[in-house]
Amino acid sequence: MSNLERTESLPDSRHRKTRRELSWRTVFYGFLRSRRRSTRRGDEGEPTYTDWHHPWLFFLATGTMLLSCMDAFFTLQLLDRGAVEVNPVMALVLSKSTLTFAATKLLLTGLGILMLVFLSRLRMFNLMRTGIILTIFFSFYACLVCYEFVYLLHMF
């Protein structure tokens, strides 16, 4: 029997669902049981890119996005009451429409957060991890939203 005849006689099992296909089970399994948390070999340095990120980064990323949404809302409320947008880039985007302003603000914030989470273990200037920058952004947004909220209360 030749190789061609043997191949033709085998049942075709490619139609079965394989574990390499992406599904929600894959996403949850990868989220809960990520494998790469450290280096593969003992002589390697500290890992820069891993499959697993500390839950604190998830809190910071989610919190910063929520604070960014609140900042956009409070900014639009303040602009309706006579305030002026100080950021020249956002003032230009705001001149187009409020929807463009909100979409641009959230897109830029989201991309920045995604980059900072991905590079969170990288050391910047050999001084600090870039994950600390995400903590600084979160703190900045928290202070900014509190300031805008108090300013809105005083305008009433």
Image: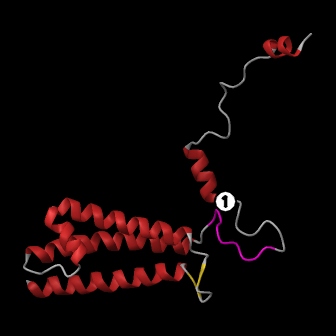
Quadrant for the C terminus, please.
bottom left
Where on the picture, by quarter, is residue 39?
bottom right
Measured as percent of width and height from the top left, residue 69 is found at 30, 69
**Is 81 a magenta residue?**
no
Label 1 sits on a secondary structure element that is: loop
- Side of 75 where 138 appears, left or right: right
Measured as percent of width and height from the top left, residue 85 is found at 17, 78
Where on the picture, by quarter, is residue 22?
top right
Magenta span: predominant SS is: loop
User: Would you name the residue on which mark 1 appears?
Assistant: 34
Specify start and end residues of the magenta stretch as a single range: 44-52
- Above or below, 109 against 124 in this view is above
Where on the picture, by quarter, is residue 86?
bottom left
Look at the image and name its color scheme: secondary structure
For image coordinates 79% across by 73% down, the residue present is 44
- Above or below, 68 against 103 in this view is below
Q: Residue furthest right?
A: 1
Measured as percent of width and height from the top left, residue 38 is found at 73, 69
For image coordinates 22% across by 82% down, the residue present is 149
Q: How many marks?
A: 1
For image coordinates 64% across by 67% down, the residue present is 49
- Side of 92 where 29 appears, left or right: right
Few, some or many C-alpha atoms within 10 Å of disc 1 (few <14, some 14-19, many ≥20)? few
Residue in the foreground of this view, choosing between 118 and 18 = 118
Measured as percent of width and height from the top left, residue 82 is found at 7, 79
For image coordinates 84% across by 74% down, the residue present is 43
- Identify residue type, mark 1: Ser
- Above or below, 149 against 11 in this view is below
Quadrant for the N terminus, please.
top right
